Structures are given as C-alpha cells and as structure tokens.
Image (tube, rainbow, N blue to C red):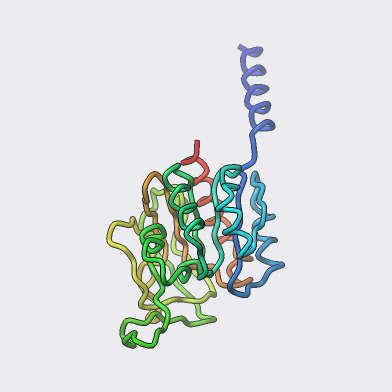
C-alpha cells in the first residue's frame, strides 16, 4: 500500500509538472488602457502563456489563421475596421469551436457588422446621426459596482459571493435573449446583466463587462474571475 501511495503521488506530481500552459492570443487596440497593470494582470495568472496582438495587426493575424496555434482568444480591443477576409476568420474560428473571452470595451467593436453582436451576445450602441437618444448606450467612470453572482454553480463564478469593484459601468446596451447570465448589478447607470456565456456556432463565448482600468486589474476578485473564465474556456477546447 505504501508503495502504491508513493507511486500515485509521483504520478500526480509528474502530470502536474508536465501540464501544458494554456496558450492565449490576447488582442488589444482602439481604446486606451492602463497597459502596465493590464499585462501584470495576465502575468499573474498561473499556467497560461499569452502572445499580444494589437489592432490592426491582430485582425490580419486572424485572417492568416494564426488563431489556430492558440487554445483560446481574449479580446480587449474596441475596433471598427474589419475586412471581409477578417470577418470570415471570425466565422471560421467559431465553426472550429475556438473558445473566446471578450472583456469590457470589446462590446463596442464592429458597430457596422451585425453578426458580431450574435458572436459576442450583446452590443454597446454608439451615438449616430440618426440614432434616437433613448437607443444610445451610456457609460459612467469611477463608480463602485455591487455585483451579484447569478449562477454560483457555473465554473466561471464558482466560489464567489457578492463582488464589489471600483470600475466603469455601461448602460442601455443590448443583451441577446439566448445568453446565460452569469453576473448582474443593480447599479442605476448600468444594464442589469454584466457577464454572460454565449454559444455561437461551435464556440463557447464568455463576456465580462467589468475591467476598465487598474482598479479592476489589481483586484484579487477580478483576477480570480478572469482566471476561472480562462480555465473554463480552455477546457472547452479539449
């Protein structure tokens, strides 16, 4: 029995030490952010490797199918220009079931591409010349946000009680009815649902609205939330 226990322990240690890191394609661009603290956030997450791509080079890399080398993609961009080849890259990624994590202002991307709203699961609607004021989305910086966990059994939100972050909220944005809500808030200037899981084609999609600046990046709760979202999506790529 003693030899068996020693063997089992050695087997577990061997497998842990030889576990491959989660490879992430990390995309930014189109919106300023606290760069040092943002990359420190990703450096703090154990068992991941990431390669940073800034727009517009990021979309070019997608069109060149560089996404195939990664376990999942994380988008923290707010980009509008997208060619037909780059749109097709998004569709091919999701046909192949590549998991995607969208963060914060990625909700504002590709205002003129309707399919992107279906991929992400919602849309921040920017001001336009013919857009009625009641249809425009809003934002508010530097507010305390009380966050309720909707699905405590979900791997992304497991182990959390109520959260509180000093962050930016978005109001009056669209959330598609088919998404599974993960996080909600009662903040008066925010849309109620601020985190969800979406399914698009063969891909699992997670969107987390929090994450504006270093206040969120440096929060242990936000780091845990991001880490659990990455681990969950990585498992969906196995």
Apparent side of residue 165 relative to residue 12 in the rendered image (left or right): left
- Percent position of residue 102, x then y: 49, 60
Quarter in which the N terminus is drawn: top right
**Along the viewing direction, whichever of 105 and 41 lies nearer the viewer:** 105
Q: Residue furthest front?
A: 84
- Above-or-below relation of 205 to 96: below
The image quarter in which residue 191 lies:
bottom left
Residue at 65 percent across and 60 percent down: it is: 41
Q: Position of residue 199 (x, y in %)?
A: 36, 50
Q: Nearer the viewer, residue 31 or 20?
A: 31
Question: Toward the viewer: 146 or 103?
Answer: 103
Left or right: residue 35 compared with residue 101: right
Where's residue 237, x and y in %?
Answer: 49, 40
**Coordinates of residue 92 in the picture (x, y in percent):** 45, 47
Residue located 68% across and 31% down the image? 18
Position of 116 compared to 43: left or right?
Answer: left
Q: Residue at x 39, y 53 (%)?
A: 152
**Residue at far left of view:** 177
Residue 100 lies, with reference to residue 121, above or below; the image says above
């Amino acid at each position: 029995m003693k030899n068996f226990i020693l063997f089992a322990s050695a087997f577990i240690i061997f497998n842990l030490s030889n576990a491959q890191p989660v490879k992430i394609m990390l995309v930014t661009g189109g919106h300023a952010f606290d760069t040092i603290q943002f990359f420190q956030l990703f450096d703090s997450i154990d068992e991941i490797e990431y390669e940073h791509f800034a727009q517009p080079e990021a979309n070019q890399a997608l069109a060149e199918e560089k996404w195939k080398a990664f376990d999942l993609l994380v988008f923290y961009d707010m980009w509008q220009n997208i060619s037909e080849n780059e749109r097709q890259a998004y569709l091919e990624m999701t046909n192949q079931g590549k998991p995607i994590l969208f963060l914060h202002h990625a909700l504002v991307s590709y205002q003129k591409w309707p399919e992107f709203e279906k991929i992400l699961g919602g849309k921040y609607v920017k001001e336009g010349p013919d857009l009625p004021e009641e249809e425009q989305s809003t934002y508010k910086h530097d507010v305390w946000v009380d966050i309720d966990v909707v699905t405590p059994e979900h791997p992304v939100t497991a182990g959390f009680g109520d959260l509180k972050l000093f962050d930016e909220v978005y109001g009056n944005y669209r959330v598609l009815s088919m998404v599974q809500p993960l996080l909600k808030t009662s903040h008066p200037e925010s849309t109620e649902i601020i985190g969800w899981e979406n399914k698009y084609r063969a891909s699992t999609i997670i969107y987390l609205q929090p994450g504006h600046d270093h206040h969120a990046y440096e929060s242990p709760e936000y780091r845990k939330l991001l880490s659990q979202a990455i681990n969950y999506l990585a498992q969906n790529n196995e």
